[in-house]
Image (cartoon, helix red, strand yellow):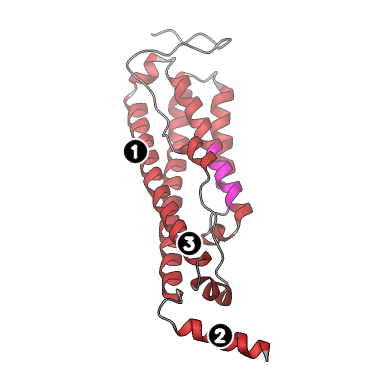
Amino acid sequence: MRVRFALLALMAVLTLSGCGYNTLQSTDEQIKASWAEVLNQYKRRADLIPNLVNTVKAYAAHEQAVLMGVTEARAKVGSIQATPELVDNPEAFGKFLAAQREMSSALARLLVVAENYPQLKADQNFRDLQAQLEGTENRIAVARNRYIKAVQEYNVTVRSFPSNLTAMMFGYKTKPSFTVEDEKAIAEPPKVDFGAPAKPPAGAPAPAAAK
C-alpha cells in the first residue's frame, strides 16, 4: 500500500507544470553545448603549442627544462579522453582540470623565459603566436564561465523540489564544475610584457647575445 501511495504521489508531482523535466532537459543540453565549446578552445590552445615551442627553441634551445615541460604538459592533456560524458564523472573531470592547470603553468613559464631573449620577442612569428595564445585564453575564460552558469542552473534544478523527484526518477545527477582553486589557477591568461626585459631567475643561464 505504501509503495502504491508513493507511486501515485510521484505521478501526481510529475503531472504538475513545475515538475522540472523540461528544465532538466534544456539545461542538460546547454551544459553539453557549453562544455563542447570549452573543449574546442582548449584544443585550439593545444594546437598552438608545437609552433610556439619550435619558435622558442630556435632562439633558446638550451632552455630544455621549460621546453620539455610544455611538451609533456600538452601530451598529458592529449592523453585524456575529453568526451561529453566526462562531465558526469567527477574524478575524470578533476584529472582533466589538473592537466589543464599544468598546461597553463607550463605556458606561463615558457613566456617568462621568452622575456630574456630580445631577438625572440622581436620575431614576428612568435609575436603572432603569442597574440593567438592570449586570444585563445580569453575565449577559454568566456567558454568556461558559460559552462559554470549552465551547470549552476542545472544543479539547482536537480536539487530543488519538486524537480529533484523528477531528477531521481530519470537518473539526473549533479555535475561537477570549476572550483575556486581552478579559477585562481586558470582564470588569468598568460601575459608577457614586451615593454621591458624581465630579470632572469637566479641561476638561469645568461640570455643569448644579439647577433
Q: Residue at x 46, y 57 (%)?
A: 151
Q: Residue at x 45, y 19 (%)?
A: 59
Circle nearer the viewer, 3 or 1: 3
Query: Above or below — where is 98 with respect to 6?
Result: above
Q: Please name the amino acid that badge 3 sits on.
A: Val
Circle 2 is placed at which residue position? 9
Q: Nearer the viewer, residue 172 or 65?
A: 172
Tell me the CA gap for discs 3 and 1: 32 Å
Q: Nearer the viewer, residue 73 or 27?
A: 27
Q: Dividing the picture into quarters, in which one does residue 90 lie?
A: bottom right
Tell me which segment is drawn in magenta.
93-101
Q: Please name the amino acid that badge 2 sits on.
A: Ala
Q: Dividing the picture into quarters, in which one does residue 111 lie?
A: top left
Quadrant in which the C terminus appears: top left
Residue 182 horizontal/vertical position (percent): 52, 41
Circle 1 is placed at which residue position? 135
Query: Above or below — where is 35 with respect to 27?
Result: above
In magenta segment, residue 98:
yes
Circle nearer the viewer, 3 or 2: 2
Instruction: Label 1, secondary structure: give it.
Output: helix
Q: Which mark is residue 156?
A: 3
Q: Is residue 152 visible?
A: yes
